Amino acid sequence: MTQSTRRDFITTTVTLAALGGASTLTACGGTNPTPAQFLYGVASGDPLADRVILWTHAKRPNLENDVQLTWQIASDAAFTKVISWGTTTATYSAGNTAKVDATGLAPDNTYFFRFVDETGASSAVGTTRTLPSASATSVKFAVFSCTLYSAGFFNVYDSAMNSGAQFAIHLGDYIYEYGSDPAKFGNTNATDNTVTAVSLGRVVSPANDIVTLSDYRTRYAQYRQDVNLQALHAKMPWITIWDDHEFTNNAYMDGAQNHDVATQGTWASRKAVAARAYHEWMPIRTPDSSNLLKIYRNFDFGTLFSLHMLDTRIEGRTKQVYGYYGDPLDPRVQPYTWADYAAGLTPVAGVYPDAANKMISNTQFKWLTDNIGAATTTWQIIGNQDIMAKLWYPQSVVAAFAQGTAAFRAAVNTYLTGPRTEFKIPINMDSWDGYPIQRETLLQTIKATGKKLVVLSGDSHNAWFNNLKSLDGTSQIGVEFATASVTAPGFESAGLGGLASTIDGTLLTNGVNGSGMGLVSDVNYSDTQRRGYLLMTVTAANVKGEFVFVDNIKTKTYAATVGKTVTVTAANLAVSYS
């Protein structure tokens, strides 16, 4: 890629004007080049104060070759005031994707950008913006997670288009790996067994679980043909992190639940091609080009907040040891039991046995805590894949779950109306609950810095606002906003859509949030049946999270509403709800 300044733009302007007459141009060999197609739109991402990543896909029909492109960034939609430009190549070896790191920009500015091939064929025009300067007083961004193509339409993305968000943050499961078999997750409606993917025209391609580089590229291409997803990418810059389904279900550093070495090859090979496809298709600035598995990175939004994007999935996570790949309710749980969990939290010669279990490597842990310790911004916001708060349920309620709906509801009622002295246990060991000592070490390390902590999380498919407390529950260290999914089904798919009011206690408090009166002590608000996203507004005084939900993903007609607004003040992390 070459880049020029505005001073040199006059030459490029003349050249591009000439390129408009494609029929007069010839390529090597004397034949007219075929105009490239930009079928997957444009995208931008990983903005900094003076630069941003620009992305597109350009391919000539029925040809397997590179496409030479010129990119432009302008301050106006007509491109009469081009700020920066250069050349790049959509290479066949990268699946005809192209990315550039466009520099020379000013902070806190909105720009227009496009790509043009040598025939004058142009991509769609996108808008992007740089990170704010120190003088910024407010930043608004949207947070997404868990986008299952076969489960429904991406109305959530469409809703965010006019939300006022300046940036998009995606916390993982941007794609899912499952094939089109009706038995696969998301292809069939759990409540009536209808094959939703077929009826909605959302059958995934390829038909198999994606394993090869070609498979992953094909799946990304299918997602990026979605009108709403493509439009939101063109609307604002994205900052993304992967979770497991960009690879395969319940992945960790050395394997995954949904990976069969006998039929799908080595985990190292699958992991490598999945990461390669991710870097090809996502507008991400690669921190280390020699190691595509390293994607944790941070961003300073003026003096308001630092955003630390973690990889709690692939970079350093050890295998989920409490339950079957993190599910202690799975019948294949043996040999792990609840006693094992308790033993992991009991020191032996001053060492916790669970300390060997890691969500992130020691290297990433040090990177994160060093950055938070050195930060001078008002807020420290961690973007991560998994719920960080303790979601511990009464033991009797967990046991009753396997006995059917009636027994489960009876157990919930008994607990809520009883003395509440019952022992509680975690049920999702694929989240931070499955790595309690590293979580405790992380929270205590951040607490020692005195910084104001907000964690953003995805993965669960449901919406949560939680307290982040010490393991013994005595110390408040931060708060957690966890977004609902874009389309992936949540508790409602198991007939538990109405569980939220018992979890957060609003059933007993006439809708008052934050009482700690529910099944899970550290949950202040939850929604267990709707799809949606988070709209976050950050100022020096507070962080406001609006839980936005759509009422329908099965048709393209929908309505969006704010289910709850939660505001956290910088003074003592005081919380209010509206």
Image: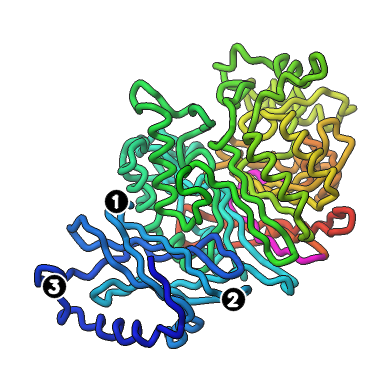
Which secondary structure type mostly characterizes the magenta part of the structure?
A: strand
Q: What residue is shown at x 36% (from left), y 47% (from top)?
A: 219
Q: Quadrant of the C terminus?
A: bottom right
Reply yes or no: does residue 452 show up in magenta. Answer: no
User: Disc 1 marks which amino acid?
Assistant: Ser
Give residue 421's position: percent from left, percent from top: 88, 25
Q: Does 155 appear above or below 434?
A: below
- Res 523 quadrant in image: top right
Q: Does 180 appear above or below 487?
A: above
Quick one: label 2 or label 3, which is nearer the N terminus? 3
Q: What residue is shown at x 39% (from left), y 57% (from top)?
A: 224
Quick one: label 2 or label 1, which is nearer the N terminus? 1
Secondary structure at numbered mark 1? helix
Q: Which residue is mark 3?
A: 32
Instruction: Tell me whether circle 1 and circle 3 mark residues in contact (CB < 8 Å).
Output: no
Q: Residues within 10 Å of mark 1 (few under 14, many from 20)?
A: few
Q: What residue is shown at x 33% (from left), y 38% (from top)?
A: 212
Q: Does 570 appear above or below 296?
A: below
Q: Where does the magenta region start and end?
A: 526-540
Instruction: Tell me whether circle 2 and circle 3 mark residues in contact (CB < 8 Å).
Output: no
Q: Residues within 10 Å of mark 2 (few under 14, many from 20)?
A: some
Describe residue 538's horizontal placement relative to residue 148 as left or right. Answer: right
User: Disc 2 marks which amino acid?
Assistant: Ala
Q: CA distance from mark 2 to mark 1?
A: 33 Å
Q: Quadrant of the N terminus?
A: bottom left
**Residue 198 seen by the camera:** no
Q: Which residue is mark 2?
A: 106
Taking the view exactly as shown, the residue that stands out farthest to the top is: 335
**Residue 354 seen by the camera:** yes
Checking the image for residue 93, the label placed there is 1
Q: What residue is shown at x 41% (from left), y 38% (from top)?
A: 272
Secondary structure at numbered mark 2? loop
